[in-house]
Image (cartoon, rainbow, N blue to C red):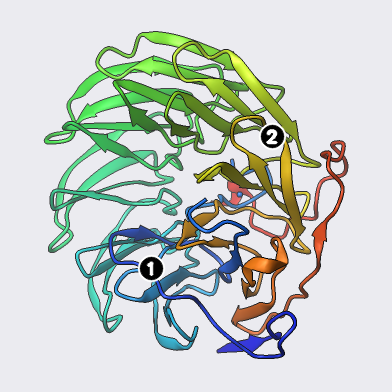
Amino acid sequence: MIERCGNRVGTGQKWGLSPGVRGGTRVWWLCCVCLLTLLAPGAAARTRQSAPPRALSGMYDETVYVGSGDGNVYALDGHTGGQLWHTGTGGAVWAAPTVDAGVVYAGSAGKSLSALSARSGAALWRFSTGGWVWSAPTVVSGTVYVGSNDGRLYALDARNGTQLWSVATGGKVVSSPAVVGGVVYIGSGDGTVRALAARDGRALWSVTTGAAVSSSPVVTNGVVYIGSDDGHLYALDARSGTQVWSYTTGAAVEARPTVVGAIVYVGSDDGSLYALSATTGARLWSYATGNWLLSSPVVAGTDVYVGSLDHNIYALDARTGLKVWSYDTGSAVWSTPAVIRGTLYYYNVGCLKAASKRAEGRGDVNQTVGQRRCAVTAPTEAADGPSLSSRPERTEPSPSAR
């Protein structure tokens, strides 16, 4: 069931999702997606006790695709939010679905990866692994690369799901692979970052960190940026794995870093968002929120957006780190925001939100997946970040149970 709840701020007129854009996208897991219209358009290890945050969907062919903890993938009309179809996957969809060339690829707690028709939801094929699939699949040149909690990275034929190769690691693979220049980069629960030949899985190099690698890699300008649960963000030479630099935060770095120009933005479980020099790792600024940052930052225009387990979405000046606004969502924000045509999408338990751009981050439309409802609150007015405080209650399954 999908239902609308809430009215447009100041008008009483109900409205749904704004029109989307075409192209491959990734989708947030669990119950819902939420939207906020920005002031200037264009401008959840997961924790030790929680499920992994994954990427939020944009749109593909004017449709939003959402993975849910009820085991289904939902397709929603991008204009109205109405349900077009839903298809079961055999288990909760904790991993983010990926949409490519008219096909939705979704991993699940059913220990499998499913391929569905983006138009109808019809099942095209399903590939079974030996563990839950938390890793968001990456599709490049007709091959699907995905990790599993069985400790393996798989390469599958995108047309029929036939296994091309697989490589065993020493721990669960919740990291999502990056594929650049014929090389697959991936982190693992054994604390290792690996570079593998995309064609056959042959090992090219590996680097061991001090703890599990839950973060997903970003590769740009010949450098691999990836976090580790040992509290460091690492910059590694993409060809050799040689360490270029590392930066120490106050806790595990589980979110995927974001690189824009000469700056790397990354959140930490210490509750802070860091802006670092991409070439040297020198800190440019940091901003403290009230809880862990499992959300990866997104830069649009002059601002950087990030969600916190303190219930807030923050908009910060990307150059200085000063707060532009914050918005209290009412519950922990596990998701990575996505910015499309001036609208910011984010995960929040049970509802889909939208806001007029005059509202400074205020949500005014809620769209539910399932039967949960959520309230919309006004943005926080304080100009400085709150201190690190109590952790939110967690209802997601424990990693040890997977």
Around disc 1, counting alpha carbons within 10 Å, would you say few (fewer than 14), some (14 to 19), or many (20 or more)? Answer: many
Q: Nearer the viewer, mark 1 or mark 2?
A: 1
Q: Position of residue 251 (x, y in %)?
A: 69, 26
Q: Relative to 111, is 355 above or below?
A: below
Tell me what residue is drawn at x 42 percent, y 23 percent.
Answer: 192
Q: Is residue 24 above or below residue 152?
A: below
Query: Could you say whether the residue bearing mark 2 is in a helix, strand or loop?
Result: loop
Q: Is residue 198 left or right of residue 174?
A: left
107 to the left or right of 166: right
Q: Which is nearer the eye, 57 or 41?
A: 41
The answer to whether residue 248 is above or below residue 290 is above
Q: Which residue is mark 2?
A: 269
Q: Is residue 59 visible?
A: yes
Q: Which residue is mark 1?
A: 59
Q: Amino acid at mark 2?
A: Asp
Label 1 element class: loop
Tell me which label, 1 or 2, sits earlier in the chain. Answer: 1
Identity of the residue drawn at 67% across and 55% down:
333
Instruction: For residue 90, say whether it is visible.
Output: no
